[in-house]
Amino acid sequence: MSHQKSQTITFESISPAEFFYRNRQMAGFGNPTQAVYSTVRELVENSLDSCEDAASLPRIEIDIQDDTSDNIIIKVFDNGCGVPSDEIPNAFGRVLYGSKYSQRQKRGTFGLGVTMAILYGQITTDSPLIVHSKTPDSQGMLYQLLVDVENNEPIVERSEELQRSENGTTVTVTIKGDLKRAYDRLMDYLKLSVISTPHARISLTIGDNVVNHFGRFSNTIPAPVIASLPHPRAADLEMLRRLTQKNSSKTLHDFLCDSFQRIGPKTTARFLRFMNMNPHQIVGEMTREDLTKLGTSLRSYDGFEKPDSGCLSPIGKQEFVRSVASQFNTTLTHYSVRGPSEWQGNPFVIEAVLATGDDFPRSDTPSLFRFANRVPLLYDSSDDILTRVMKRTRWARYNLHTAVPVALFVHVCSTRIPFKAAGKQSIASVPEIENEAQLLFKELGRKLSKMTTKVQASAREIKKMREFSKSFRQIVRFSASLAELENVPSTENLVQALFEVDTDA
Amino acid sequence: MSHQKSQTITFESISPAEFFYRNRQMAGFGNPTQAVYSTVRELVENSLDSCEDAASLPRIEIDIQDDTSDNIIIKVFDNGCGVPSDEIPNAFGRVLYGSKYSQRQKRGTFGLGVTMAILYGQITTDSPLIVHSKTPDSQGMLYQLLVDVENNEPIVERSEELQRSENGTTVTVTIKGDLKRAYDRLMDYLKLSVISTPHARISLTIGDNVVNHFGRFSNTIPAPVIASLPHPRAADLEMLRRLTQKNSSKTLHDFLCDSFQRIGPKTTARFLRFMNMNPHQIVGEMTREDLTKLGTSLRSYDGFEKPDSGCLSPIGKQEFVRSVASQFNTTLTHYSVRGPSEWQGNPFVIEAVLATGDDFPRSDTPSLFRFANRVPLLYDSSDDILTRVMKRTRWARYNLHTAVPVALFVHVCSTRIPFKAAGKQSIASVPEIENEAQLLFKELGRKLSKMTTKVQASAREIKKMREFSKSFRQIVRFSASLAELENVPSTENLVQALFEVDTDA
């Protein structure tokens, strides 16, 4: 047994910007390929969120230029609501700062992505971010920004008023990246983005003249999502402590009615009676034990209604089916939806389109396309909960075999998606989401089974029709010659009317 | 086309504690099962790091108690170096604060894990953390702590001097958790922990009397890891900006020699000549363009030596093979190592033990056991780079088939592991690590091929020996009867001497 000298240990604190600078792979900026993809993705998602806030039909223009030294200049224009001038430095140049923290469905969630793109540009090319934004209250402001990583603060290099003709934001970042290797993912991402946001129109220009257009498949702007109060089942002790501090003079009864959704005077009274708690108790005077008891009770009580889904924006049957069919050659499609349900008090809906068609590979499981809060997820599929449930589903039972090319488009939307990492690529295992996905996939499986049976049945019908039609034509020809007619009458319409084949899904 | 009213948008900032409180699944605290596992894991890793700093043979005692209301009390004792009294509140009660940020291999990396355990305890059971620690400079201090999540600051509920007989730390947290479902993972984790830290002894007590002991397989304390300067290839523009600010009065030549590893006066002179840069340039006077040029040059220059590996602590051939063989029934083992190499300037070593033995399942690929900086990784294996390289390796070429049960224990150590998420469960795709893993696995494959050929050869030898020995005994018996001997002489030794079978790997 040997003894060695121990080391001096120094303690220090790092800023969240420093944390993500050091661990950029966690936020999707691990290598030059991913960096191109993530930069475009984060900017596009910000733009789409901003258009939802403006209630405008999104028009996003992406422009990518390679310069001589491998620097890639990525510029994204939108017609969203714009960012107020005094918020621009923090909104873009500070990690964990943003407008995404309210209790409603948003693509962005962390106030992290765009700042990561700036940070990545700054450390690889030393180029600042350029933002040009106009809100209804301004003529337009231009900012040139860097990030002070050690202090998680924006550095404003330049700011000036600059006219912009319409509301919205244009962001330009310069990063070192591998555009060639990122290209396919980028195209997939945009192709799928307009499936989950069918009312968006996105254009992509690379270099001088390559322009691709994606969407728009719908002119209907979805109903705006409304931020909601938390559901009582979301009440952990941290939340309760904050809420009771803010409402310290209220009675327990009023506190519950005012602070949570889905709990009116009647439910509150019933809940408090059941829990044997005093409705007139002033919440500021509750002991820690009282709060703990209240929290446990709120989380376990059965009598609350399902969470409000006004804070969610599922794609919806008509739009989802239409956008899938617009983007891919589909033969049959079927839509199913489950929810709103809740996980730890966060409402969620899960909806899916099952489609058959020659665009999809033949396999013994469907090709899976994952979406979370209207954002397509392309990386890290293997450990995603949707992939795992999909693999666990016994598709063979539902007549799925390699002869039928099937794809499954699944969209989970929630006020909070349990992403496994800040790069937002895969969804963690949450029992509630897992169960709902399982039930949804089974439902779609049964539908698939029916659809394929129907297709097989109609194939049999067509065969029968062909055979009958052959003999029928002979009979008609024979009768015609007997009747000494010059032209043999057509049998087409008659046969079709007799054997009308139903191919509707 | 419809127009709807736009929403009011409020911007806000959240603390890193708040970020991880909201996204606890990213740090490994997504559900009650994971929470038990992660709490134990984070505490044990902290303890092991602390023992390395103290250069003591680690003795870790874990005690887990279920109380009546599903609360689980987890207490971890170590004989490490202790935490200085004035650092205890921040070290335990603040996210992104710690002693792990220096350029050397550590289990902990983020200053996050233990604070997450406290946070989780606090929001699920409202119980504070209790820390009792003694350093060589103190008699012992006891703290009772909570986390102020909104401000990312510790709340000290109680602190008092309390005698502790030896240096080290004891931490107690109370969380809501699912011990039953976490149990198997926990046991696997501890079983594997003493493979990667063979000089540690860990005991686990659950309830009153269940005690399990893990290790110790070695009494040798590994050489201490020494924090190193960054490698020139790690110099991104952020790092250069900070370093030049700190050393603004130095000449470029001296700045390079003093700030980076593996770059003495000769290499520096050669590099600057090659890059056509002035060695007498004062770094404080360099323009941003100069810095950008310097950074690009440092990252792309071929002439630097490989990074220093004194900051790394691989397990080593003898210890790794012995600990694998102590924990599993192995027939044959082989060790290989590659490195030190570097990814983005971070040195890394990758080492592995390939073992055959009946403890492992029979499959057409080896069972994979992953380790990063001496920590076993048990979750999220599918998207891990090691799993992907393992699956890509054509094991059939190396004679691996379902008749041979093979396991592969792989350890990556680095000053920075590119974890995919803060929960530290899987390693992201980094081309340099990917390449080295690929070469390592191929090398082990070739060795496996030789080993199995040898085993097959020796199986043939044994068969031949048995046949020969049979006839030989008959001859001896016949000769004995001819010679009219009463006892037939034994042929065993003779046969064995003739057919000595080499089964060494």
Image (spheres, coloured by chain):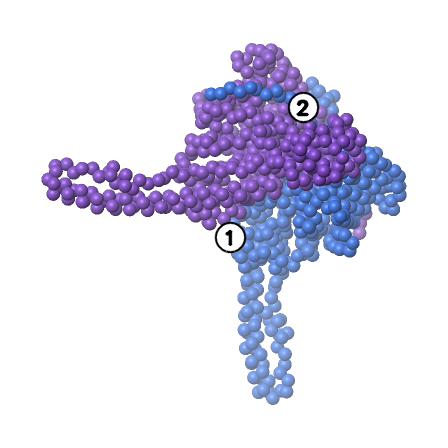
Chain colours: A purple, B blue
Q: Residues within 10 Å of mark 1 (few under 14, many from 20)?
A: few
Residue toward you, A25 or A504: A504
Q: Which residue is mark 2?
A: B12
Chain letter of the residue carrying label 2: B
Label 2 or label 1, whichever comes before in sequence order: 2
Foreground mark, 2 or 1, reads 2
Q: Residues within 10 Å of mark 2 (few under 14, many from 20)?
A: some
Q: Quadrant of residue B20?
A: top right
Observer able to see residue B227: no
Q: Position of residue A385 (x, y in %)?
A: 57, 41
Residue toward you, B327 or A47: A47
The extreme left residue here reads A484
Q: Amino acid at mark 1?
A: Arg
Q: Is residue A354 left or right of residue B351?
A: left
At horizontal 56% and vertical 71% (from top left) the residue drawn is B465
At horizontal 45% and vertical 43% (from top left) the residue drawn is A447
Q: Which corner quadrant holds the C terminus of chain A?
A: top left
Residue toward you, B131 or B1: B1
Q: Is residue B188 left or right of residue A493?
A: right
Q: Position of residue B52 (x, y in %)?
A: 77, 44
Distance, label 2 to label 1, CA atoms, is 58 Å
Q: Which mark is residue B397?
A: 1
Q: Position of residue A395 (x, y in %)?
A: 47, 47
Q: From the viewer's perspective, is residue A65 above or below residue B332?
A: above
Residue toward you, B339 or A44: A44
Q: From the viewer's perspective, is residue B214 above or below residue A320?
A: below
Q: Quadrant of residue B146?
A: top right
